[in-house]
Image (cartoon, helix red, strand yellow):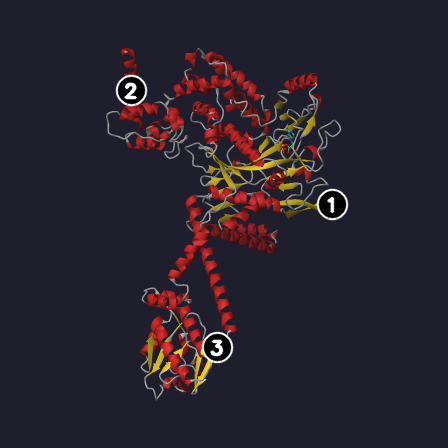
Amino acid sequence: MSATKNKRNIELYKGVDFRRELTFREKKVAEIKREKMKILADVKPVPKYMITVDLSHARGNLDALRMCLSELEWKQYPFGRKDQHCDIHWQCQNFEQNPDLYGGKVNKFPGISCICSKNNLFRVLDQMRALYPDDYDFYPRTWYLPEQLQQLAHDIRKMNEKRVKPRPTFIVKPDTGSQGEGIYLIRDVQDYLVNNGRANVCQEYLSDVFLIDKFKFDLRVYAVLKSVDPLELYICKEGLARFSTVPYESPTSRNIHETFMHLTNYSLNKKSTSFNRSDRDDEGSKRTLTSVFSRMQRHGYNTDKIWKRIEHIIVKTMIAIIPDMKIEMLAALPPNKPGPTCFQILGFDILLLHNLKPILLEINSSPSLRIDSEVEVAPGVVDYVPSPKDEEVKIPLIRDTLLLVAPKKKVNYLESQKRRRARRERRRQKRDEDDRKRKEEEASRPPVQHERDGVIHVETQHPRSSIVIIKSQEDDDPPKKLNRESSFLLPSVHNVFTNRNENDYFNKDQNQNSLKNDEMDSLTFGYGERTDFIDRIEDDENVTVERLTRENLIDHENSHTKEMYSKSNIGNKTSTGNQYDQDIDNTGNEINNDMRYSDNKDSDYMIGQGDGCHNDRGTEESSNSEEEIDSEPYVSCLKELYPDPLAKKFEHLRIYEKLAEVFMVSLGVRATQRLGPTGFRTFSRKCRLNKKGITNATIDILFIDMQRKWEHVNPERTTGKPGLGFRGFLDACHEIARRKFANGNMLQTMEDFIDYCLDNLHEDQLFQARCNPRLLPRRARPHGYPILEPMVSPTSPMILEENIGVLLESRLAGRNYSKPTSAEDVDQFLRRHGQLRALKTTVKRVKSRNKKKEKDE
Ligand code: ADP
């Protein structure tokens, strides 16, 4: 048996090249080792307050991000982080690219690329324009092809009949195209190329545009959407201007095909031979927005007004697409599923008309964040070189976006750490500078020596030297330890103004307590730091140390100098005296400091600091003054647009969000974005549309009609997806409102319809749960809605309406509770006082009581 096995093994090994096998194994081992190291690097504990960023899907944004992250000193994970989520996940493509995220923040909202596609965006804006024609007049008239080809043909014919001047031109753009791909101009419907059913939008071509140096340009304005619910929106103060590369002329049949004249895309124009790569502010085919605006200002244009209009365009556009985003969020991140929170940088393309009116061309959901540009170094060979203008705009944009969305606590902590480090560094530099200056000063001033009766007295100019007087015990017989040098000192008093450390005195290698031969005259006691040294000298039997305060030092010195110089004939007596005075004056304060700090318990710490000047208090003082410098607020390139300051101005435009809530309730608890026939019936039943004379049969027919209509709206996106999307549902609502709530004005009609639906829906449990799941007992919460994440924030006006108001009134009646005033208070109140079950019974009671009252009356 074993023999056959051996034989089989031999057979097996026959064909194996063992050398190859070995190298293969080595490679495998090395790979495993590398993998291990990577895991270890991942597992390495990260400080609690470190902000972590996952860059594994960042691709084209990587360079810019890395620059920002190293500047911020946050931790980056180029390969992602195993088993743990990061604080921020940066993805180059869309949300769906990384579906396994369960925490942190991600830089993409689900479904936003679809929402911002040209076809969808302009349909959404059209629905808003139907209600608010004056507010939504900032984009060109749009036809959706091939669906509206007939309509387009009809409109062109009419314009031609009217002989509109200049002759109208149209621009056709593929729905999913970008970077100018597949765009062309037409003047007649026959020029339209039917691309195998591919969806296109066709827009009126705006020929009367504002030119700079005869070139057409468009503006790329960046906005940061921080949150959808509640809506939080920021605008970047800096942007880009992209110029065409052929001087502009109004479209004619001759120049209609000139891409470099009519299209301003960077990706197209960079291929032009006349593309200007100048890095100067006021030149080049790509410039910063501020440089363009300042040039316009110089020519007398009011750019503030243009900017304000651009801000309004951004807010209004976001208000239009927010309902769709909420629905996408519900499908991708249902409340019972853990998931990340989202934010996103959006690029708005704006064209300036000749009258300076800004026009929205499109929203780019993944604007390029590259900071390099392609250069053709040889024919057919391209290289990437850094692009300073892109860096100038995109680095602050990314950095401030990261700062905006990162956990606040961590950001604050890291910033304070950084400030502290910078302060320390500044202080160190200042100290070094001072030391250098002092040394230079000392070096340039030679020590003054006086010699009389064989005694040499050396004055030093050390600004911080304190003065210690060492007295010999026996005047006639100088102490042994001060043997040879004592002849250089006064018999009883030795002034020492020196600059050496204690070891010079306590020369441990030789006789203890003996001064080095050549350093007798160079001992210094820096105030506040050498007290232990002086103490040790005092312990020496043969030496007496006298500590002098500033006053008695002056007295002593004066008397001593007088005594000394009265004996001498040296002429510069007064000047020397002055020098002393000055020295003392300079150091006087420090001597006082010495007295103060010698008692300080932390004197050891201060000795360790080395420089008497930088004591604890000094640190505090300097840090205070530096704190003032530091406390200059950091100026972000992002400016808040919503809620502050534009919420009040545009809140009334958020009408479709209410219908989005109705739509979400009708969807049920499934994670879907489309409404089936049953869902549509449920909507009709819950909103009690039958009371308005709408039968189930009407509802079914309407559903089928709308489904058919919207199926053909965008064949690329809707084929194979049954049901009605939100925009189809909105269309159906318009139809119902038109039939049953007609009120002359379309806006009024729609408002009446929405109010009616909401009134009836307030009774519905699921609706209430969607408004605020906390208001329901746990059993009744659909699919365990998390308590802390209500679908609609408690401040939503819906919660505050009617039912809660009535309930609170009734609950509070006759009790001593103070009536809650704000939305948060209401929420807190409900949580504290018995929650909704009790509330619901009260609602019923109040309602029946009201009815009774009405009857009685
Ligand atoms: P893409 O997403 O492919 O870049 P855009 O909508 O941004 O498509 O259009 C590309 C360029 O075409 C714009 O930069 C602009 O110069 C020009 N353009 C687009 N629409 C119009 C228009 N309605 N009128 C005039 N020029 C337009």
Question: Judging from the image, what secondary structure is the residue with disc 3 in?
Answer: loop
What's the residue type where badge 3 is placed? Pro
What's the residue type where badge 1 is placed? Pro
Query: Which residue lies under the disc numbered 3?
Result: 447
CA–CA distance in space, label 3 to label 1? 73 Å
Question: Judging from the image, what secondary structure is the residue with disc 1 in?
Answer: loop
Residue 101 seen in render: yes
Question: Judging from the image, what secondary structure is the residue with disc 2 in?
Answer: helix
Query: Which residue lies under the disc numbered 2?
Result: 846
- Residue 619 tag number: none
The quadrant of the rendering that contains the C terminus is top left
Percent across and percent down for residue 99 are: 50, 37
Image: 733 above or below 815? above
Beta carbon at label 1 within 8 Å of ligand 1: no
Residue in view at x 74 percent, y 30 percent: 255
- First of labels 3, 1 by sequence position: 1
Q: Are marks 2 and 3 in contact (CB under 8 Å)?
A: no
What's the residue type where badge 2 is placed? Val
Task: From the viewer's side, name the closer residue of 244 and 343.
Answer: 244
Q: Is residue 661 left or right of residue 65?
A: left
Crowding at mark 1 (Cα within 10 Å: few <14, some 14-19, many 20+): few
- First of labels 2, 1 by sequence position: 1
- First of labels 2, 3 by sequence position: 3
Most distant residue in the right direction: 254
Q: Is residue 541 left or right of residue 57?
A: left
Residue in view at x 50 percent, y 17 percent: 746
CA–CA distance in space, label 2 to label 3? 99 Å
Image: 188 above or below 619? above
Residue in view at x 67 percent, y 41 percent: 285
Query: Which residue lies under the disc numbered 1?
Result: 379
Task: From the viewer's side, name the closer residue of 159 and 683.
Answer: 159
Percent across and percent down for residue 414 are: 44, 50
